[in-house]
Amino acid sequence: LLSVLSTACEDCLYMQSFFNIYEQKDRVTEKPDFNEEIYSIEFIDVSFKYPKTEKNIIDRLNMKFVKGKNYAIVGENGSGKTTIIKLLNGLYDEYEGNILINGIEIREIDKKSLRNCLATLFQDYNKYQFTIKENIGFGSIDNLDDIEKIKYSAKKGGADQFINCLPNNYTQQVGYWFEGGTQLSGGQWQKLGLSRLFMKNADCLILDEPTASLDPFSELEIFKQLYQNSNEKINIIITHRFINTVFANKIIVLKNGEIIEKGKHDELLKQDGFYKDMFDIQSRGITLN
Ligand code: ADP
């Protein structure tokens, strides 16, 4: 009885979140759609704190992303990297300053249309207890039955090889919730998440630690795929691995929500600052003394 009561109590809390989201939905549907090809994304003096935090998590941030360039955002844990991505995806409207896409403030755009032109893979991406085909196809619901597109996305996400080794290939049930399901490794789930991203023909790809669970071969392959045709897109990659920043056109270094350094890999090494310190620690490798 106690267990049932506590579950009921917990479910009621979720219901409140549901109503909160439901109310927001009404508010945003009144805004105009955004259907343009993205050529620039700009943060102008953006400051932000979460509803329950006191100090700014993002502090007077100014940066610009333009079509055809690859960007890397680096910084210690808690420096605000993921928060930037959440803001860009329109998850919070209560920021100071402006976030502009093609010069249009994103608060003034319909959220659904905004997210349609961004392909974002968050660090805690979804692992759906469905088939492989559905796990990838959910990136573009309208193309859920387009197996050729799903296979193409799987190849770009580096998932095709392991899928071809599964007993039922693309119709293989994954996870252990349902009968006949097979559990995947962390790296394989990550490849599915990446493949899902490529289902969308988005102008801007945003990846939060996209290769954290991948082996070095798979990682290299993913970055090759990302940088291919990158002159048509904006790629923004949050990473802790400096092997991924070397080829970025611009690296943005964050500390406590502020940009402390920016530039190319070589330029930042020459500056001999925080980036170089982080790079040195990683490139030095492990020593026991
Ligand atoms: P990073 O991606 O650089 O590791 P985050 O953007 O996830 O950092 O978090 C930055 C700071 O914001 C952290 O101090 C974190 O505790 C805080 N934070 C993140 N999400 C929330 C939230 N939903 N509510 C309150 N504080 C949060």
Image (cartoon, rainbow, N blue to C red):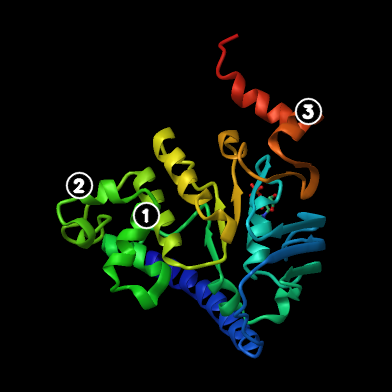
Dot 2 lies on which element?
loop
CA separation, marks 1 and 3? 38 Å
Inspect the image, locate mark 3, and give the three-letter code of the amino acid beneath it.
Answer: Lys
The residue that mark 3 highlights is 270
CA separation, marks 3 and 2? 46 Å
Question: Mark 1 vs ligand 1: CB under 8 Å?
Answer: no
Report x, y in % for residue 136: 35, 62
Which quarter of the rendered picture does the N terminus lie within? bottom left
Report x, y in % for residue 262: 77, 43
Q: Earlier in the sequence, mark 1 or mark 3?
A: 1
**Foreground: disc 1 or disc 3:** 3
Report x, y in % for residue 70: 62, 50
Residue 38 visible, this angle: yes
Report x, y in % for residue 155: 34, 53
The residue that mark 1 highlights is 192
In the figure, 21 relative to 69: above or below?
Answer: below
Mark 2 is surrounded, within 10 Å at the Cα level, by few (under 14), some (14 to 19) or many (20 or more) other residues, namely few
The residue that mark 2 highlights is 165
Nearer-the-camera pick, 16 or 10:
16
**Foreground: disc 3 or disc 2:** 3
Identify which residue is drawn at 71% across, 64% down: 41
Disc 1 vs disc 3: Cβ atoms closer than 8 Å? no
